[in-house]
Amino acid sequence: MEYLISFDSFVEELLFFLGNYGFIIVIIFGVMHPLFENPLSLLNMALAFSILGIPLGFLVVFSSNLIGIFLLYYFAIRFNEKSNNILFRKKVPEKILNWVKTTDTWRHILVIGVPMIPTYPVKIAVPLSKVGFKKYLITLVGAYVFLYFGNFLIYFGILGFISDGIPDYVSYILLIIFVIYVYFGKSVFKKNKINEKNEF
C-alpha cells in the first residue's frame, strides 16, 4: 500500500533527526499512548525496532505501555473520587459506563486493540466504569497484545497480499464495521430472528 512506503521513509527521516535520543522518544510515546491514544502505536513500534532491534524494542514498548496503562487507571480512579462519581449521577454517562462494565471483556479487548481505529472513549470508559483493577488490567493488556499482533502484520507487510488491492478508505470502513459487529452484531441478528418469527 502507498501509505506504507511513505511511512517507512518518514520513520527513516525521524530516526536520522532523533539520533542517539530515539529510545527516549520510544519510552515517552509508549507511556503516552494509553493515556492519549496518540502518537500512533505503529509509529512507536517501528521506531523501537529500528533503534533497539525487535526483541528489546518490543520489551521497551510493552513496558512503557504498561506504565501508561497503570497511570490511566490511577487517573480514572482519582477522577471518580475527586468528582464524587459525577458520571454515575448523570443519566446518559451512567448508562454508558454500566454498559461498558457489563459487556464481555473479550469484546473490549478486540475493539480497543484494533489497529488504526480511534477507540479512546472505550479505553478510558473501562476504568471509569469501576470494573475492578484485575478486569481492567486483563482488558487493557489483552487489547495491547491484540494491537501488537495487528501492528506486527502491518509492519512486516504480511497483510500486503490482502490489502494491496483494497483502497485505504475501504480498509478503514471495514475495520469500523468489525468494531460495530463485535459490540452489536449478536443483538442485531437476534432482533432480525425475532422479527422473522413475528411475521409468521
Image (spheres, grey):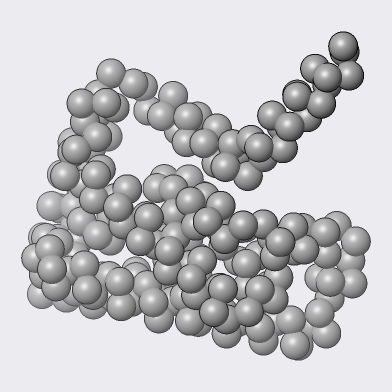
Decide which of 172, 8 is in the foreground and name it. Answer: 172
Residue at 44%, 48% in the rendered image: 114
Q: Horizontally, is 45 left or right of 78 in the view?
A: left
Image quadrant assignment for residue 165 = top left
Decide which of 52, 129 is in the foreground and name it. Answer: 129
Q: Horizontally, is 82 left or right of 7 in the view?
A: right
Measured from the top left, where is residue 73 in percent x and y? 56, 79
Residue at 67%, 57% in the rendered image: 103
Number of marks in the rendered image:
0
Q: Vertically, is 70 above or below 98?
A: below
Residue at 21%, 67% in the rendered image: 58
Measured from the top left, where is residue 107 in percent x and y? 56, 52
Q: Horizontally, is 28 left or right of 172 in the view?
A: left
Decide which of 50, 94 is in the foreground and name it. Answer: 94
Residue at 41%, 29% in the rendered image: 171
Q: Vertically, is 181 above or below 200?
A: below
Q: Vertically, is 38 above or below 193?
A: below
Image quadrant assignment for residue 121 = bottom right
- On the question of residue 141 being in view, the answer is yes
Quadrant location of the C terminus in the rendered image? top right
Measured from the top left, where is residue 152 in percent x and y? 23, 50
Measured from the top left, where is residue 62 in percent x and y? 30, 71
Quadrant location of the N terminus in the rendered image? top left
Q: Horizontally, is 52 left or right of 141 in the view?
A: left
- On the question of residue 119 being in view, the answer is no
